[in-house]
Image (cartoon, rainbow, N blue to C red):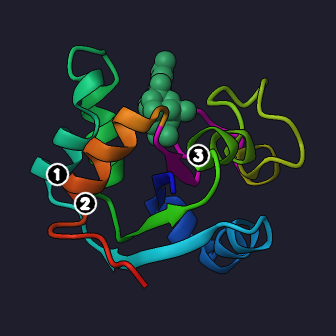
């Protein structure tokens, strides 16, 4: 069964949106296999966003992701990578439709409440980065 890495970002935690976001994931029928609240180190944040290392906004991205606790989630379900990205909504606030998490709760490009892996390959890489060891098989 396909798995993805989702993360409530520091602004989502700060604003009290953990429950709202988890409720949406569960209501959709996806299953949470692992979950932890943690403070990301700079090294972890840099590794997570390695694909953006050369972008002008990389520094801000890492600073933001390490600015407070995040909630890391291993989520499982049919086509969960693509479907959860649809539920998250687009990166640009002008494109994030109402009904999506970002469309409903975010209005800036930088503080956008939630991360979701953008492909099965990214999901595998990010899950092994954030969750050491074997996935739980309950
Ligand atoms: P994420 O990885 O956080 O789930 O977001 P995403 O896939 O929707 O967007 P991505 O292209 O991976 O970018 C990662 C984060 O970088 C910030 N960003 N800023 N100023 C800019 O042009 C710009 N582009 C991206 C966003 O905060 C985005 O979530
Ligand atoms: Mg991304």
Question: Magenta stretch?
Answer: 106-117
The residue carrying pointer 3 sits among few (fewer than 14), some (14 to 19) or many (20 or more) residues within 10 Å by Cα, namely: many
- x, y (%) of residue 25? 68, 66
Label 2 element class? helix
Of labels 2 and 1, the one closer to you = 2
Q: Residue at x 43, y 85 (%)?
A: 138
Q: Which residue is drawn at 68% across and 31% down?
A: 90
Q: Are marks 2 and 1 in contact (CB under 8 Å)?
A: yes
Residue 44, label in figure: 1
Q: Is residue 29 above or below residue 58?
A: below
Q: Which residue is drawn at 31% across and 45% down?
A: 124
Q: Does the magenta stretch include residue 46?
A: no
Of pointers 2 and 1, the one earlier in the residue sequence: 1
Q: Which residue occupies the extreme bottom position in the image?
A: 138
Left-right relation of 8 to 18: left
According to the image, label 3 marks what residue?
Answer: 112
The residue carrying pointer 2 sits among few (fewer than 14), some (14 to 19) or many (20 or more) residues within 10 Å by Cα, namely: some
- x, y (%) of residue 68? 34, 67
Q: Which residue is drawn at 43% across and 65% down?
A: 74
Q: In this view, does 54 lie above or below 72?
A: above
CA–CA distance between discs 2 and 1? 8 Å
Of pointers 2 and 3, the one earlier in the residue sequence: 3
- x, y (%) of residue 16? 62, 77
According to the image, label 2 marks what residue?
Answer: 130
Label 1 element class? helix
Depth check: give the residue in front, 10 or 30: 30
Q: Does the residue labelled 3 lie within 8 Å of ligand 1?
A: yes
- x, y (%) of residue 126? 30, 47
Q: Is residue 109 magenta?
A: yes
């Amino acid at each position: 069964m396909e798995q993805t890495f989702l993360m409530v970002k520091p602004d989502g935690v700060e604003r009290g949106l953990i429950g709202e976001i988890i409720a949406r994931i569960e209501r959709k029928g996806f299953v949470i296999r692992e979950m932890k609240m943690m403070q990301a180190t700079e090294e972890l944040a840099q590794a997570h966003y390695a694909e953006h290392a050369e972008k002008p906004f990389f520094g801000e991205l890492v600073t933001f992701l390490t600015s407070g606790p995040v909630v890391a989630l291993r989520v499982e379900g049919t086509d969960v990578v693509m479907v959860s990205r649809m539920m998250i909504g687009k990166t640009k606030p002008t494109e994030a439709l109402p009904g999506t998490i970002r469309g409903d709760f975010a209005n800036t490009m930088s503080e956008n409440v939630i991360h979701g892996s953008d492909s099965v390959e990214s999901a595998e890489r990010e899950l092994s980065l954030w969750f050491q060891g074997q996935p739980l098989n309950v």
